[in-house]
Image: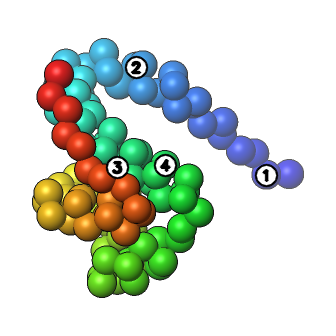
Amino acid sequence: MQTTTKRPAFAGFKKKALQNEEVRKEYEALEPLFAIKKELVAARIAKGLTQDEIARKIGTSKSNISRLESLNNSYMPNLSTLMKYAEALGMRLDIVLH
C-alpha cells in the first residue's frame, strides 16, 4: 500500500508564508498585477470566449494570451495590449486610481 503525504491547504500555506516579511512585501507588490490578470480571465469567461478565440480577435497567439492571463509569472502587459483585449471582449478598459 502506497503512503501519501497530505499537502497543506493553500490558505494555511499562504498564511504561514505571509508571516515572513520579505514574502509579504513581494506578495503585496504583485497583488495589483494578479488582480488585473484575474479580471481579464473573469471577463473572458463571462463573454464565453476561449483563449484561442480572443487571440484571433487580437491578432496574436493563444500562448501569448495564456502568458498574459497566467498567475504563474510576473509578465506585465502593456496598456495597448490591455486595450486590445478589452476591445476584443466588446468592453472598454477603465483605469481607476485609489
Dot 3 falls on a residue whose secondary structure is helix
Camera-near label (3 vs 2) is: 3
Disc 1 crowd, CA 10 A, few/some/many (<14, 14-19, 20+): few
Residue 63 appears in the figure = no
Instruction: Of the two numbered discs 3 and 2 on the same chain, state the one appearing first in sequence.
Output: 2
Are dots 2 and 4 in contact, CB under 8 Å? no
Question: In terms of image quadrants, where is residue 62?
Answer: bottom left
Question: Residue 79 at what x, y percent from top left?
Answer: 14, 57
Q: CA distance from mark 4 to mark 1?
A: 39 Å
Kindly check if marks 3 and 2 are in contact, taking CB atoms under 8 A apart as contact.
no
Q: Are marks 2 and 1 in contact (CB under 8 Å)?
A: no
Viewer-nearest residue: 97 or 19:
97
Foreground label between 4 and 1: 4
* Residue bearing mark 4: 42
Q: Which mark is residue 16?
A: 2
Q: Is residue 26 above or below residue 69?
A: above
- Mark whose residue sits in front, 2 or 4: 4
Q: Amino acid at mark 3?
A: Lys
Q: Are marks 1 and 3 in contact (CB under 8 Å)?
A: no
Q: Quadrant of residue 82?
A: bottom left
The residue singled out by tag 1 in the image is: 2
What residue did someone put label 3 on? 37
Residue type at tag 2: Lys
| Mark sitting on residue 67 | none
38 relative position to 1: left or right: left
Residue 81 % position (x, y): 21, 65
Instruction: Decide: is 57 above or below 20.
Output: below
